[in-house]
Image (spheres, grey):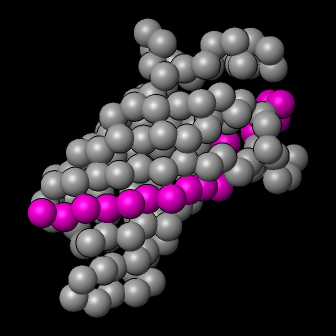
Amino acid sequence: MVVSLILGGITHHYLASNLPYCNTINDKGTIKNPYAIVMVGNENVKIGFLKGKDSVCGDIHGPIASFKLSDNFDFMLGGYNTNFKEFKDRNIIPPSTGGITPIVGLNYSLSLYESKTIKASFDTLFSVGIITHAIKFTF
């Protein structure tokens, strides 16, 4: 069994960078939004749970899965609850479908450290509208 802990993050909004997000770092749509993901599975497929903050500082949680494509790339698929009130308060139309904000993208892992029991990597998820960065520990 493989267990991964992913701690994020810094997020870049490349499709809608001029909106009034919270926790902005710059005027180009880059924000800091903390989140944690715990995933379990094997080397090829992992499923897990995401908990954190979205782009308008609303609490989020939801399922997520990872499918290995190569040594450095995974396909990520999941979703989390949409905080309609927080988005409306900032005059932003949320990127949701049926009350769920989808996660669909390609994750790139850059190895930072590896031993027989732990692996650390810098992960970048390229998703629709955003790019987000995190540190991943795999046991």
Farthest-out residue, bottom: 115
Q: Where is residue 27 in the image (x, y as percent from the top left)?
A: 87, 47
Magenta-drawn segment: 1-20
- Quick check: can you spot residue 12? no
* Left or right for 78, reference 59: left
Q: Position of residue 67 (x, y in %)?
A: 22, 51
Farthest-out residue, right: 27
Question: Residue 100, located in which quarter of the rendered image?
Answer: top left
Residue placed most toward the observer, 59 or 29: 59
Secondary structure character of the magenta stretch overall: strand
| Magenta-span inclusion, residue 53 | no
| Magenta-span inclusion, residue 2 | yes
Task: Name the residue at 63% across, 13% down.
Answer: 84
Specify the quadrant that holds the C terminus: bottom left
* Left or right for 63, reference 91: left
* Left or right for 93, reference 60: right
Task: Name the residue at 25% across, 62% down.
Answer: 3
- Quick check: can you spot residue 26? yes
Q: Where is residue 61 in the image (x, y as percent from the top left)?
A: 46, 32
Task: Name the residue at 16% across, 55% down.
Answer: 41
Q: Where is residue 135 in the image (x, y as percent from the top left)?
A: 50, 67
State whether residue 95 is above or below residue 27. above
State whether residue 12 is above or below residue 104. below
